[in-house]
Image (spheres, helix red, strand yellow):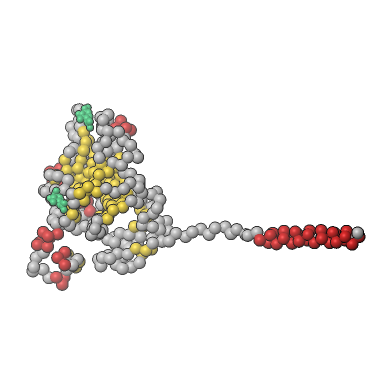
Amino acid sequence: MLAMKFLLVVLLLHAMLASMVTEAASGNKVKRIKPPKPVKPVQELLTCKSRKSRCFMKRIKCPVECPKVKPKNPKDKACFLDCYSPKCEAVCKSRKPNCNGPGAACYDPRFIGGDGIVFYFHGKSNEHFSLLSDSDLQINARFIGLRPQGRTRDYTWIQALGLKFGQHNFTLEATKTEKWDDNVDHLKLSYDGTELLIPEGHSSEWNSNDGEIQVERTSITNSLTVSIPDHAEISVNVIPVSEEDSKIHNYQIPENDSFAHLEVQFRFFGLSSNVEGILGRTYRPDFENPAKPGVAMPVIGGDDKYKTSSLLATDCALCLFSSKENKDEKVSPLMDYGMLDCKGGGNGITCKK
Ligand SMILES: *[C@@H]1O[C@H](CO)[C@@H](O)[C@H](O)[C@H]1NC(C)=O
Ligand SMILES: *[C@@H]1O[C@H](CO)[C@@H](O)[C@H](O)[C@H]1NC(C)=O
């Protein structure tokens, strides 16, 4: 009997001890959680393939603030390297048009020239004007607008852009809409005469087969960027004329039209020094803007010089555009090619002094 009791006590002690040990052991198993390391974003590397560029074949790292060329979040800034800038550095830029930056065409159209000077060009509603005309790039705009009674001129907005480069045509339009809805897409695109449908959604994109043009949405609806490598990058928003603006300026916008139009910012690369167009000429190295800084609302004319017969016509008085074939014809056989900087290949060689 005594022996049984002793055995029981021993067993009990043993069990207690065992549980203490496992407790201690499990206590040791508690993992220390380290604070998560901040994930360092991968800074993409960019380079320029043109020999003319200061960045030719150099590997340029994107800034930490904007590590990616195409950020996932539509609000994040994108990394950008201008191969034609004298500085070879990647910078951050907003993917949406900046109406206060150079190359902007916003409101009833207010432009900011390549020289940074603000000016207005009113044109006429339902007419087309050349915003830029160079030997290898043409950009026209269609103006829409209205003229309230008693006004001497049309109020105008840019409703569509027509681009010509090489043998290609590209158009971008804000579709007419009675009542504006941000969630409905108001963009209509075409490439070489065929309508282009790019699914809605941020970062949804389209490339032409030959890589000559790329279009990418920069928000779910109503914003995109058009890139023509070595020529231009164009960021666009479609917006209505707001009731507030309509009141302030007394536009007298009718009930049945929201006057959907474009807000645009252009970036141009490798323009020639005699580039033309309402906006284009402000990029000439020798351009003297008749609109002086400090003047409240400098209006610049030129309707007669820059009017074209359609969105894709290049028939304005000062238009310079010629498709590649014509350009090749213009190259004089007497030129000293040793003095020229040539690029391209096959039948697309172009040379400049
Ligand atoms: C481009 O547009 C012009 C003018 O409308 C037209 O004559 C030409 O055929 C078009 N080219 C293509 C490739 O669609
Ligand atoms: C809007 O109404 C005006 C008359 O007030 C009319 O002339 C015009 O055609 C209408 N526009 C549309 C898009 O229905």
Q: Position of residue 319 (x, y in %)?
A: 13, 51
Figure quadrant of residue 42: bottom left
Q: Which residue lies furthest to the bottom in this view?
A: 338
Q: Quadrant of the C terminus?
A: bottom left
The residue lying at 24 percent from left, 58 percent from top is 209
Q: Residue furthest front?
A: 1
The residue lying at 49 percent from left, 59 percent from top is 39
Identify which residue, 145 or 38, lies in the foreground. Answer: 38
Left or right: residue 345 compared with residue 249: left
**Does 248 sit above or below residue 333?**
above
Identify which residue, 128 or 288, lies in the foreground. Answer: 128
The answer to whether residue 257 is visible is: yes
User: Count the marks: how many?
Assistant: 0
Left or right: residue 59 compared with residue 22: left
Q: Residue furthest right?
A: 2
Figure quadrant of residue 70: bottom left
Left or right: residue 326 compared with residue 39: left
**Does 40 sit above or below residue 217?**
below
The residue lying at 15 percent from left, 42 percent from top is 303
Q: Position of residue 10 (x, y in %)?
A: 84, 61
Q: Quadrant of the N terminus?
A: bottom right
Q: Position of residue 350 (x, y in %)?
A: 16, 64
Left or right: residue 60 compared with residue 322: right
The answer to whether residue 275 is visible is: no
The residue lying at 33 percent from left, 37 percent from top is 181
Q: Which quarter is ligand 2 in?
A: top left
Q: Where is residue 107 in the image (x, y as percent from the top left)?
A: 28, 40
